[in-house]
Amino acid sequence: MSIWTRISDAIAALTKGESLSEVFERLKTPPERSVAFAIAVVALGAKMAKADGLVTRDEVTAFREVFQIAREDEAGAARVFNLARQDVAGFEEYALRIKGLFGEEHSCYCDLMEGLFHIAMADGTYHPNEDVFLGRVAEIFGMAENEFVAMRARFVPDAEPDPYSVLGVSPETPISEIRKVWRRLVRETHPDSMIARGVPEEAIRLAEKKMIDINRAWDEINGAAA
């Protein structure tokens, strides 16, 4: 059974008058949390896609890139997207419900935020309203400002990414400490670690860009220190 079939089943269980955000109350334990993660990315992504005033085909396509949606599952994914887009509940309510679901599991929020950044940049433009949206979601999730800045540095090509910002360290940080940060990020980005956190297998592609970026940043810093 695909994750989109499981998502459709979860949505079908909603009673009349409930919003999509109510789904999170039903998905608090594994393996259902992988369903909640997918709904969270799609639902918040649908809200964010409206932040710049326009839902583009590129942004919709970005969901396929994140989740590798099979053709037979496209209708289910589209239903989640449209339900979230039409839902009167605001994005902050979604983010708060997600925080209630995952608690203080910080790595899950990093995974989710990376999916949202991928969607935000799908049309090649990072709109100021998207930055406000993502900043507020990160705040609700409890992400530190420097971690949000590091993530934005990896996704937003306003300038050549600073390798220190990508790893969330400073040029004054000892190289031995930077190595520890790099190794921790590599461990957290491994597919097995992501699946253990509740990231569905369909979304493991989220790790590919992160792994490339953190390794490139480490190589640049380590090369300069050699």
Image (cartoon, rainbow, N blue to C red):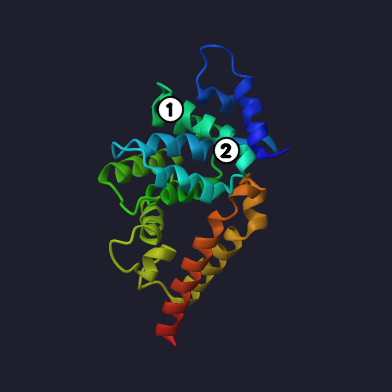
Q: Disc 1 on helix, strand or loop?
A: helix
Q: Disc 2 on helix, strand or loop?
A: helix
The quarter holding residue 221 reads bottom left
Q: Which residue lies furthest to the front in this view?
A: 71
Residue at the spot of label 2: 74
Quadrant for the N terminus in the image:
top right
Residue at the spot of label 1: 93
**In the image, residue 61 above or below residue 168:** above
Badge 1 or badge 2: first in the primary sequence: 2
Neighbours of disc 1 within 10 Å: few (<14), some (14-19), many (20+): few
Which of these two is toward me, 79 or 202?
79
Residue at 58%, 49% in the rendered image: 68
Eye-nearest disc, 1 or 2: 2
Residue at 47%, 78% in the rendered image: 219
Residue at 28%, 41% in the rendered image: 129
Q: What residue type is labelled 2?
A: Glu
- Marks 1 & 2, CB-CB < 8 Å contact: no
Q: Is residue 106 visible?
A: no
Which of these two is toward me, 225 or 177?
225
